[in-house]
Image (cartoon, helix red, strand yellow):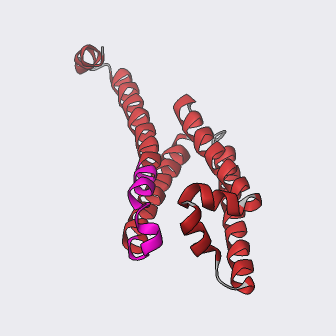
Amino acid sequence: MGSSGFLVCMLHSVIALTCGALMMFYTNKVTVFGHGIEVATKLKGSTSHDQLLIQTSESFSGLLLFAIGFLLFMAAFVKDREFQIFFAKGCTSLHVAVAFWRVYFEQKLEDLAHHLPRLVVGDVALALSWVSFLFIHGERSMIKKLQQSDSPSLNKLELVLV
């Protein structure tokens, strides 16, 4: 990817790898850090069987997030512009879908509802980082097309951008 795409991919990769590793190996501590002690004990489960299922589920979620971080790391080194745009649009759509999912489902859970605004803002911020990449990439493409056409409107565009 270009320098902006590389930075966005690497930033998301580091976030996903770190969160995934923490979810796999420090499940209880991450839950307490993210939700507080009271909510974390409620989310832990009441029986030992429930606790094992919940811990296994969270560990697999962490593994999935770690794998996504690894894929983002690999995507950072792809040079194809069409792939970059497709990938950024897909990541933006994914973050927006997660934000909608949080609003629709997590607001119904009393224990998680008070964390909802913070989590939705985080999802929207991650989506906006991809949107900024698409905007920068689109602006560069537009300038290159205008430079190739040798049109008089190029001088006007240069004045606007400066």
Please indicate whether residue 89 sits to the left or right of residue 27 in the image: left
- Tell me if I can see residue 77 in this picture: yes
The magenta-colored residue range is 107-124
Is most of the magenta stretch helix, strand or loop? helix
Q: Where is residue 10 in the image (x, y as percent from the top left)?
A: 62, 39
Q: Which of 106 and 81 is in front in this view?
A: 106
Q: Is residue 146 above or below residue 38?
A: above
Q: Where is residue 120 in the image (x, y as percent from the top left)?
A: 41, 56
- Tell me if I can see residue 1 in this picture: no
Q: Residue at x 69, y 63 (%)?
A: 28
Please identify the quadrant where the C terminus is shown.
Answer: top left
Q: Nearer the viewer, residue 131 or 44?
A: 44
Q: In this view, does 159 lie above or below 119?
A: above
Q: Which residue is drawn at 69% across and 46% down?
A: 74
Please identify the quadrant where the N terminus is shown.
Answer: top right
Q: Position of residue 147 (x, y in %)?
A: 37, 21
Q: Position of residue 35 (x, y in %)?
A: 54, 61
Q: Which residue is drawn at 64% across and 79% down?
A: 45
Queried whether the magenta region covers residue 122, the answer comes back as: yes
